Image (cartoon, rainbow, N blue to C red):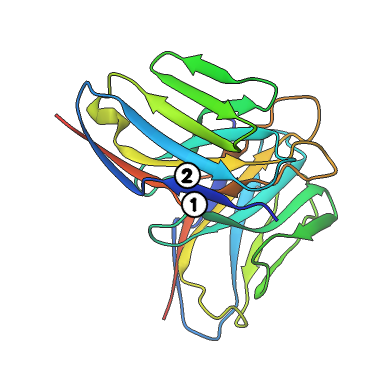
Amino acid sequence: DGGITQSPKYLFRKEGQNVTLSCEQNLNHDAMYWYRQDPGQGLRLIYYSQIVNDFQKGDIAEGYSVSREKKESFPLTVTSAQKNPTAFYLCASSIVTGGGYEQYFGPGTRLTVT
Amino acid sequence: GENVEQHPSTLSVQEGDSAVIKCTYSDSASNYFPWYKQELGKGPQLIIDIRSNVGEKKDQRIAVTLNKTAKHFSLHITETQPEDSAVYFCAASIIGKAAGNKLTFGGGTRVLVKP
């Protein structure tokens, strides 16, 4: 089965703790993306990566960090500096060149911080 | 940066009627416009997309139109069915390695199809 997996589906943390969300893809895509979705709102880009060991900030990168050590993996860390971390987090991947620009999304992780 | 506005935020239609969702974008360099459908608690799925060199694209009951001059694009769903009930998002992007294929999303439209 090809696709994107995110784990866990639900995550609960206490305020002040860092937490890492997992994203893995077996689509052999070069590019991976992290989005944040708040209730009743659209998706906002946190970070993206087009190649291993390289990543770029999106529109709302403050309080988040990422790594891209392997092509298939792009974990997102929500740090204690993120002022309002409770949200639904979505990971996506796509090819970069050669046509077919669709971004494929994972099932998401709902993070609740209290 | 790019800004995408989407209207309406909610849309209720009778089964069998048509639904239309409209989006405007701000960056004239944007050249790729996908539409995603999101069901409750799931990730979005692409339902149709259009590139800026095409004015209209159709796939069965779904069609998208693009007006580059006015910088707006629309999703049309005909003969709506209860399974069309979901949240729909439009997005805009500049495709290519230099731009990173980053998507800017509209705020979403919650569509309810009443049987």
Q: Is residue A34 left or right of residue B59?
A: right
The spot of residue B115 in percent (x, y) is 14, 29
x and y percent of residue A112 in the render?
43, 71
Q: Is residue A72 visible?
A: no
Q: For the residue carrying disc 2, how many other residues have a C-alpha within 10 Å: few (<14), some (14-19), or many (20+)?
A: many
Residue at the spot 54% in from the left edge and 18% down from the top edge:
B57
Q: Do the numbered discs 2 and 1 sit on residues whose CB atoms are within 8 Å? A: yes
| Left or right of A113, for residue A101 | right
The image quadrant that residue A79 belongs to is bottom right
Above or below for A39 versus A49: below
Chain ID at mark 2: B
Q: Can you see residue A21? A: yes
Q: Amino acid at mark 2?
A: Gly
Vertical position of residue A100 compared to residue B1: above or below = above
Which numbered tag is attached to residue B43? 2
Q: Secondary structure at mark 2?
A: loop
Which residue is at the front of the view, A61 or A1?
A61
Label disc, if present, on residue B114 of the rendered structure: none
Quarter of the image with the N terminus of chain B is bottom right
Q: Which mark is residue A108?
A: 1
Q: Chain of mark 1?
A: A
The residue tagged with tag 1: helix, strand or loop? loop
In percent of the image, x 75 and y 24: which residue is there?
A: A99
In percent of width and height, residue B62 lies at 42, 21
Q: Residues within 10 Å of mark 1 (few under 14, many from 20)?
A: many
